[in-house]
């Protein structure tokens, strides 16, 4: 396998990933993980809603000293959607047919120099998990309970045991957990 599919999510202690505005309440060096993971990747794999949100925001973001904004705007982006007709954000391509086969092809492509990184994209994450296409879950767990919202894994999602391969805690109370999927 040439690439890994990495699911990277911000989640609350109660598993909510939706609208992670609560992350702004916890500034700190834990966000360096996001920079490292993006620069270790050569493509983003996104669902339509996440793509649309990113495509509306990132092209107008101020440039930063580490180059995160440039990387986000220039990295290859694969958008999984059967309804999106056009993907205008730089370097984007829509996957709308034979979706899981196409994602498998991208994952196994020999020309990949980094991970396929999935941000947000709840529907896509759950579909990938059902097909055993996720290699690792990189979870940034924030010390907050929101009580309602879209959870990372839907009711009825069945994933066998995950193997913890890294864990870090940060002064803001945020914990980074890296799990290897059992199918790897």
Image (cartoon, rainbow, N blue to C red):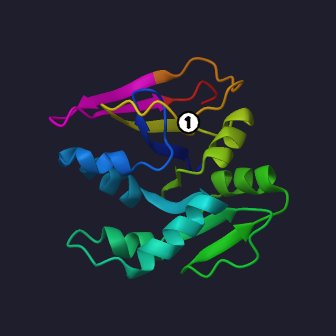
| x 67%, y 46%: residue | 123
Horizontal arrangement in the rendering, residue 63 relative to residue 153 (left or right): left
Q: Which residue in the structure is indicated by mark 1? A: 152
Magenta span: 164-179
Residue 73: in sight, yes or no? yes
- Residue 34 appears at what percent x and percent y? 34, 52
Frontmost residue, 72 versus 24: 24
Split into 4 quadrants, where in the image is the C terminus?
top right
| x 71%, y 54%: residue | 103
* 93 relative to 79, above or below: below
- Residue 3 appears at what percent x and percent y? 56, 50
* 129 relative to 101, above or below: above
The residue sitting at the right extreme is: 98
| x 67%, y 35%: residue | 129
Instruction: Reply yes or no: does residue 9 show up in magenta.
Output: no
The residue sitting at the left extreme is: 171
Split into 4 quadrants, where in the image is the N terminus?
top right
SS for dot 1:
loop
Frontmost residue, 16 versus 75: 16
Count neighbours of disc 1 (C-alpha within 10 A) and say few if under 14, some if 14 to 19, many if 20 or more: many
Residue 112: in sight, yes or no? no
- Residue 69 appears at what percent x and percent y? 35, 72
The quadrant in which residue 177 appears is top left
């Amino acid at each position: 396998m040439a690439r890994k599919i990495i699911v990277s999510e911000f989640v609350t202690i109660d598993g909510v990933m939706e609208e992670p505005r609560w992350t702004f309440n916890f500034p700190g060096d834990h966000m360096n993980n996001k920079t490292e993971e993006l620069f270790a990747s050569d493509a983003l794999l996104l669902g339509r809603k996440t793509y649309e949100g990113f495509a509306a925001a990132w092209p107008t973001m101020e440039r930063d000293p580490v180059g995160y904004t440039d990387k986000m705007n220039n990295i290859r982006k694969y958008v999984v959607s059967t309804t999106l007709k056009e993907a205008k954000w730089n370097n984007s391509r829509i996957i709308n047919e034979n979706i899981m086969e196409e994602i498998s092809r991208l994952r196994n492509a020999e020309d990949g120099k980094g991970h396929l990184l999935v941000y947000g994209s709840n529907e896509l994450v759950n579909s990938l998990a059902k097909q055993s296409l996720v290699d690792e879950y990189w979870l940034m767990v924030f010390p907050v309970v929101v009580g309602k919202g879209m959870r990372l894994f839907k009711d009825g999602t069945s994933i066998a045991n995950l193997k913890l391969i890294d864990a870090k805690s940060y002064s803001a109370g945020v914990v980074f957990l890296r799990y290897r999927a059992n199918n790897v």
